[in-house]
Image (cartoon, rainbow, N blue to C red):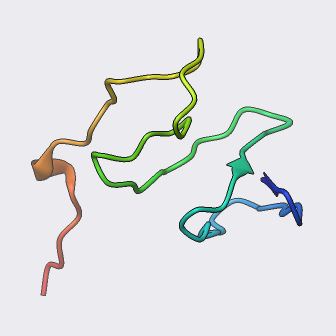
Amino acid sequence: MHTRTESVHLRAGELYMVARGTEHKVIANDLAQVLLIESKSFKHTGVTESDITQNTFEYLPVNNIATSST
């Protein structure tokens, strides 16, 4: 993951939180699974509309959310 000021290498199971307003670019050398947690109103390409801009996203159904068994 790259920002304008740093590059971060993540390994399996690691987490990195990007501060609000920070430009960033996620890349992977190999196949990767990524979990993004963002508000519904978030525009993933900011104010820029381009061929990668998406307006519909896949969401996890509520019944797939892990809950405590205790």
Residue 36 horizontal/vertical position (percent): 47, 51
Q: Residue furthest bottom?
A: 70
State the residue at coordinates (59%, 11%).
51
Left or right placement of residue 31 versus residue 19 in this view: right
62 or 69, nearer to the observer: 62
The quadrant of the image that shows the C terminus is bottom left
State the residue at coordinates (16%, 42%).
61
Q: Report the label total.
A: 0
62 or 56, nearer to the observer: 56
State the residue at coordinates (59%, 42%).
33
41 or 58, nearer to the observer: 41
Residue 18 horizontal/vertical position (percent): 62, 66
Residue 23 horizontal/vertical position (percent): 69, 53
Left or right placement of residue 55 versus residue 19 in this view: left
Q: Residue furthest front?
A: 47
Residue 5 horizontal/vertical position (percent): 88, 65
Left or right placement of residue 29 versus residue 10 in this view: right
Relative height, residue 21 to residue 41 (above, below): below
State the residue at coordinates (88%, 61%).
7
